[in-house]
Image (spheres, rainbow, N blue to C red):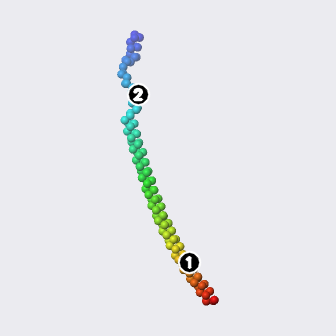
Amino acid sequence: MSNKTEAKDTFPKIEVAAAPQNPFNAFDPLAAWTAAQQNWQKMMSDAYGRAQAWADEYAQIEAQMFSRARTAVDMWAQVARDTITYSEQLSAQARKLGFEAIRRASAGA
């Protein structure tokens, strides 16, 4: 009798075929290549955007620089014109004073 009770308590063995284990399932070179290409494309796109923004900002700064240079040249030209005009006035005044001094000296002699 002990044999019958033991047979009822034990379950029959079911053999399951073990799935073959592939150690390279986690590594997919095509997926890694695609991800690398996407990252590279994003990096290049971002770099291009930053370079374009920098070039636009530099163009604005450059325009200001040229505008200020033109203004400075105009101011220098005005200073040069004023200097020439002032020199002309001084020269005329010096001639006038020189002739008056000679006239007084000759009239008094």
Q: Position of residue 5 (x, y in %)?
A: 40, 13
Q: Quadrant of residue 58?
A: bottom left
Residue 23, numbered label: 2
Residue 78, numbered label: none
Q: Amino acid at mark 1?
A: Leu
Q: Position of residue 60 (x, y in %)?
A: 45, 59
Q: Is residue 42 above or below residue 85?
A: above
Q: Is residue 8 above or below residue 43?
A: above
Give the residue displayed 42% in from the left and 52% down from the top: 52
What is the spatial separation of the Cα atoms under label 1 and label 2, in whole angstroms?
100 Å
Q: Residue furthest right?
A: 109
**Closer to the camera in the image, 1 or 52:** 52
Determine which residue is flagged by label 1. 90
Q: Is residue 4 left or right of residue 94?
A: left
Give the residue displayed 50% in from the left and 71% down from the top: 78
Q: Is the C terminus in the top left, top right, bottom left or bottom right quadrant?
A: bottom right
Q: Is residue 100 above or below residue 20?
A: below
**Closer to the camera in the image, 66 or 52:** 66
Q: Position of residue 7 (x, y in %)?
A: 38, 14
**Closer to the camera in the image, 31 or 6:** 31
**Closer to the camera in the image, 50 or 98:** 98
